[in-house]
Image: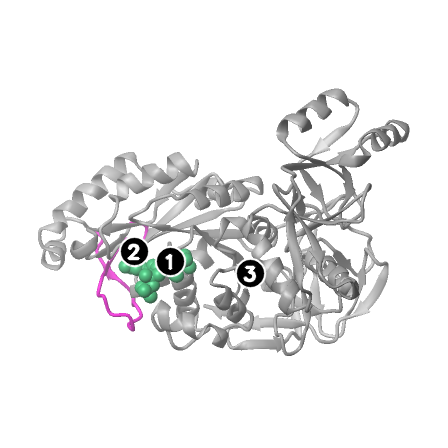
Amino acid sequence: MKKYNEKEINRRRTFGIISHPDAGKTTLTEKILLFGGAIQLAGTVKSRKSNRHATSDWMNIEQERGISVTTSVMKFTYRNFEINFLDTPGHQDFSEDTYRVLTAVDSALVVIDSAKGVEPQTIKLMDVCRMRQTPIMTFINKLDREGLSPLDLMADVEKNLKIECVPMTWPIGMGKRFQGTYNLYKQSLHLFSSSESDRITEGIRITDLGDPQLDELLGAQADELREDIELLEGAANRFDVNAFLAGEQTPLFFGSAINNFGVQELLDALVDLAPPPGKRQTTTRDISPYEEVFSGMVFKIQANMNPAHRDRIAFLRICSGKFTQGMKIRHHRSGKDIQVSNPIIFMSQGRSTVEEAYAGDIIGIPNHGTIQIGDTFTINEPLKFTGIPHFAPEHFQIIRIKNALKMKQLQKGVTQLAEEGVVQLFRPLASNDYILGAVGILQFDVIKTRIKYEYGVDAYYTDAHLDCARWISCDDPLQLQEFEKKYKMNLALDAGKNLIYLSKDRWSLNYTMEQCPHISFHETMEQH
Ligand code: G4P
């Protein structure tokens, strides 16, 4: 097959960053943007946090709420590579959002705190990556502090993240004794200085570890490094690009984000090792990024990013072909062609208009609620990209209003927030309630804030006394009808009008499942 736009596509890297809260994801993100030339000034995390709105509009909102709830997309150029950098929500309660973001990336970067090792949220996110065989790079952060030994960290990653580790760099000491890292592949030494402003330059190249220069530079720790390297040469895995691309092996980098240490090395590896845009699955066939005809999928909707404009942006990953400003593309769910005259790209300094973009790029399409998560756009072929499911919620609340005149606003608010994927909305077959479902309990905080401030609705929330939910399907319409009749009190329709069974506890769910073997109960539902 002829590869269209090959040169442009091969110089694109689209990756997401994930970590347990506090591991240093925000700090590393900022430093990557700094080394990538996307921002000029790095402050400490503190000063940056207070100036967050300078880099993206909606982070301001997160700052007020004190948690990272949204996903930002940033684009920059590094070494002639076009990098699309996707941040993910740090908190586990937003793992559904993280999953959706990971459908749009070609690789992911995991940040781990060297003192804490692998933490629960990292394990959960890693499971998500594994579901999609996403290639993973790992950055062990905070080497300027006392932490676990590098060998223990490796064992920890292998055991808890269930992925083979390949150290690409190796730390020389840690905490007060941290002297830098040795790059095992480039055979070069990077000496650490705690300066926050310096960019690291090419390391000192040491091809022979016996070189007395090493003793001059590292003193007594030179021998420690020699022993470590000897050990690694015998015992560590070799980097295997196929195992990495299959998500079975992760290259490991050590550094200290706050001190800018190890960041450039990491960024270089991201462009050198991480894959260019890959193929994407649809219900009918796989789509290669090198196909000439444009196609794309929406993985995220963000409303009211700029409260002054009350805008709504659909984030679309281009899956194949080239996009040009003003292009007419078909929105398959509605069957309509739309002309995208004001597509947006997010640069660190703000938004700008996209003139052209290629497979792997993320563009924002402003709209008024017509576009939903999971929507496919192409020129003509009726494709449907797969892999953006809803997960069965585990928390349920009923939302009601004090002032009946606000019913319209409530409807609008919950529907829009459900379309954004902030919450799932269920309408019971047997009542007029609005049941909200969430995978993580904190999602309700976001709903409550947004319903109040963005939609002006004074609502109150009551426990729905539900514990789990399963989507229902059945090949036989008659049996389905019978099931609907019998379990009407437990059934509801989701925002996409799919039938879902809501249960007050797991025992009852299992009992119903046993009673109805001809009915299929699903924990996930692909969005329509
Ligand atoms: P997150 O996005 O993963 O939640 O982490 P974030 O970057 O906000 O960093 C969490 C904390 O870890 C911050 O400290 C930050 O300064 C610190 N940190 C990040 N990288 C390094 C590093 O390389 N070395 C050390 N020693 N610390 C690092 P904080 O106490 O929350 O804020 P602050 O009071 O230090 O500003």
- The kind of residue tagged 1 is Gly
Q: Please tell me which residue is depicted at 87% across the width and 28% down the height of the picture.
A: 482
Judging by the rendered image, the residue that carries numbered circle 1 is 24
Mark 1 Cβ inside 8 Å of ligand 1: yes
The quarter of the picture where residue 362 lies is bottom right
Look at the numbered disc 2 and give the secondary structure of its residue. loop
Q: Please name whichever residue, 92 or 361, is drawn nearer the observer in this view of the structure.
A: 92
* Residue 432 horizontal side relative to residue 465, left or right: right
* Alpha-carbon span between mark 3 and mark 2: 24 Å
* Residue 458 horizontal side relative to residue 254, left or right: right
Asked whether residue 142 is drawn in magenta, I would say no
Q: Please name whichever residue, 96 or 76, is drawn nearer the observer in this view of the structure.
A: 96
**Residue 320, image x, y percentages:** 69, 57
User: Ligand 1 quadrant?
Assistant: bottom left
Judging by the rendered image, the residue that carries numbered circle 2 is 142
Q: Specify the segment rendered in magenta.
A: 184-207
